[in-house]
Image (tube, grey):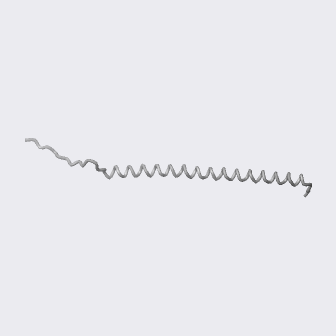
Amino acid sequence: MRRTCKTRVSKGAFTLLEMVMVIAIIVILASALMLGVTGYIEGTKKAKNMVDDSAQDVSAQAHASEVKLAGYSF
């Protein structure tokens, strides 16, 4: 008579190693996303500052030309 080795394999369950790997992949993807978002935020802050600076320059130039047109001298 031949002995057969019965192994117990539960279907539909994840092993601990599989769960750890999934969590590690999620952490890596989340960190990449955070790096991208912080880079995007820094870029928008720089762009906003550039727009604000150029708006102030235009305002100062407009004020200076108004002063010249009004005949005031400093």
Q: In which quarter of the image is the N terminus?
A: top left
Q: Residue at x 66, y 50 (%)?
A: 47
Asked which quadrant contains residue 67, the reply is bottom right
Q: Residue extending furthest left? A: 1
* Front one among 57 and 18: 57
Q: In which quarter of the image is the C terminus?
A: bottom right
Q: Which residue is drawn at 46% across and 50% down?
A: 28
Could you tell me residue 64's position as x and y percent?
85, 53
Left or right of residue 14: residue 38: right
* Front one among 1 and 57: 57
Report the number of numbered marks.
0
Could you tell me residue 18's position as x and y percent?
34, 49
Could you tell me residue 5's position as x and y percent?
16, 45
Q: Residue at x 78, y 53 (%)?
A: 59
Left or right of residue 73: residue 35: left
Left or right of residue 8: residue 36: right
Q: Residue extending furthest bottom? A: 74
